[in-house]
């Protein structure tokens, strides 16, 4: 059973930055795509960024140009660098790992929660004005 552990959340002022990390256990990290989702109070969980096995990246419009997703297969880690944060970014952030996939993925695939077989416990990000 793959485990994902997120870290790096916290309280930050608007305009600030945070870097989230997600470390995976198991031996299939490099064979999967990874994604970051978030869930704000009273809202559904939404896709914000994904990275496929080739290193191709995909972003929701709401974070494009501000957030950067990256992966390190040797360390089994996916990271999310978040810059220019605003109060609308306040949410619990979750990383997810897909099932074994082809080398290249699509936005549609990475944005779908049913594509993911494992989730982390979530890390809280709070942005103050």
Image: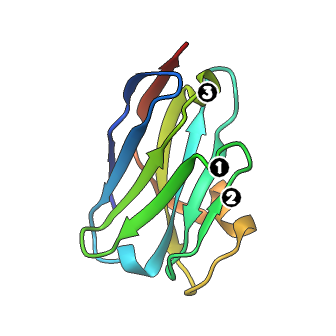
State how the image is colored: rainbow
Tell me the SS state at disc 3.
Answer: loop
Left or right of 6, for residue 90: right
- Give the class, few, some or many, for how many residues have Cα within 10 Å of label 3's Cα (few <14, many ≥20): some
Of mark 2 and mark 3, the one earlier in the sequence is: 3
Q: Does 55 appear above or below 120?
A: below
> Residue 117 in the image: x percent, y percent?
51, 62
| Label 3, label 1: how far apart the Cα atoms are | 12 Å
Q: What residue is rendered at 55% in x and 81% in y?
A: 101
Q: Does 30 appear above or below 42?
A: below
Q: Are marks 2 and 3 in contact (CB under 8 Å)?
A: no
Identify the mark at residue 15; answer none if there is no mark.
Answer: none
| Label 2, label 1: how far apart the Cα atoms are | 5 Å
Q: Is residue 1 visible?
A: no
Tell me the SS state at disc 2.
Answer: helix
Of mark 3 and mark 1, the one earlier in the sequence is: 3
Q: What residue is rendered at 58% in x and 46% in y?
A: 66
Residue situated in front as seen by the camera: 14 or 119: 14
* Residue at the spot of label 1: 47
Quarter of the image with the C terminus is top right
Q: Are marks 2 and 1 in contact (CB under 8 Å)?
A: yes
Tell me the SS state at disc 1.
Answer: strand
Of mark 2 and mark 1, the one earlier in the sequence is: 1
Q: What residue is rendered at 60% in x and 21% in y?
A: 87
Identify the mark at residue 111; answer none if there is no mark.
Answer: 2
Identify the mark at residue 40; answer none if there is no mark.
Answer: 3
């Amino acid at each position: 059973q793959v485990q994902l552990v997120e870290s790096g959340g916290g309280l930050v002022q608007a305009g600030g930055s945070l870097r989230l990390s997600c470390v995976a256990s198991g031996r299939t990290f490099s064979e999967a795509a990874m994604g970051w989702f978030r869930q704000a109070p009273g809202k559904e969980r939404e896709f914000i960024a994904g990275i496929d096995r080739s290193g191709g990246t995909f972003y929701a419009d709401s974070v494009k140009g501000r957030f950067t997703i990256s992966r390190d297969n040797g360390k089994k880690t996916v990271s999310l660098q978040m810059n220019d944060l605003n109060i609308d970014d306040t949410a619990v952030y979750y990383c997810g790992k897909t099932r074994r996939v082809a080398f290249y993925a699509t936005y549609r695939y990475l944005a779908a929660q049913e594509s993911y077989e494992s989730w982390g416990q979530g890390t809280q990000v709070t942005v103050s004005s």
